[in-house]
Amino acid sequence: MAAWTRNRILPLVALAPLALAACQTGGQPNRTLTGAGIGAVGGAAAGAIIDDDERGRGALIGAGAGALLGGAVGAYMDNQQAQLTQDLQGTGATVQRQGDVLYVQLPADVTFGFDQYDIQPQFIGSLSQVASTLAKYDQTVIDVTGHTDSTGDFDYNQRLSEERANSVANFLVANGVARQRILPRGAGESFPIMTNETEAGRQANRRVEMQIRPVTQ
């Protein structure tokens, strides 16, 4: 298995038992996944791991960047995480790391207006800084996944999640990130990180997640 593919799959494998446990309540299936780590799994599962080492390498070749040497990955992702955390300080967005993968969670109430997919003016400055950082650390590929709560029509929620993912992806491209590196997708209401039975839970479930993965030689 190629190195980039292993980097993509291992974080999911490590968290799979937690995800399965969260999906069972009293022996009954439950679609609600709990915890920040499980939310990251949900975002990846929404894309069904459709891309592999060739996609990662092809994206970097198209963007004019090269793959990382294995020994350089840790420091590279450390530095990128620190910069992204600084970019998003005070916004309510979070940056987490699992292995060599960074997970950036953008709450919808920060990024978008209610039931909208245009980025809110007050968040443009911070997202511009994120784009600048991602453009600088160009030996990665970025999955952008939109999520909604379960309020309303399932198909409508799916479309809204796709529009929000595309909105963030297009913003990044417009601010210097090579399009080849970005894969936007919508997960609709399928991967909640909290219950949809409360307003706080629904608010948490309305989000866009970015998964930033290094491509290694």
Image (cartoon, rainbow, N blue to C red):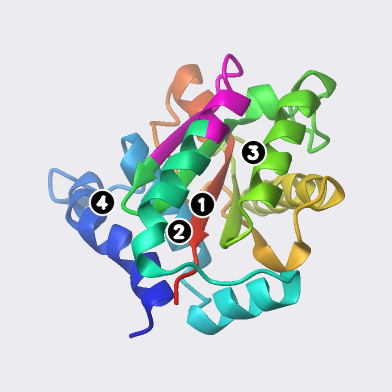
Which region shows up in magenta? 83-96
Q: Residue at x 48, y 61 (%)?
A: 214
Q: CA distance from mark 1 to mark 3?
A: 27 Å
- The residue indicated by pointer 4 is 19
Q: Position of residue 30 (x, y in %)?
A: 30, 47
Q: Is residue 95 magenta?
A: yes
What's the residue type where badge 2 is placed? Ala
Element assignment for label 2: helix
Quadrant location, the C terminus: bottom left
What's the residue type where badge 1 is placed? Gln
Instruction: Compare residues 179 and 114 and report the one nearer the observer.
Output: 179
Q: Position of residue 150 (x, y in %)?
A: 54, 39
- The residue indicated by pointer 1 is 211
Q: CA distance from mark 2 to mark 3?
A: 24 Å
Of label 2 and label 4, which has the lower sequence position? 4
Of label 2 and label 3, which has the lower sequence position? 2
Element assignment for label 1: strand
Of label 4 and label 3, which has the lower sequence position? 4
Mark 1–mark 4 contact, CB under 8 Å?
A: no
Crowding near the residue tagged with mark 2, few <14, some 14–19, many ≥20 C-alpha atoms within 10 Å: many
Q: How many marks?
A: 4
Element assignment for label 4: helix
Q: Quadrant of residue 209?
A: top right
Q: Is residue 3 left or right of residue 141?
A: left
Q: CA distance from mark 2 to mark 4?
A: 12 Å
Q: CA distance from mark 2 to mark 1?
A: 8 Å
Quadrant location, the N terminus: bottom left
Closer to the observer: label 1 or label 4?
A: 1
Q: Is residue 141 left or right of residue 75?
A: right
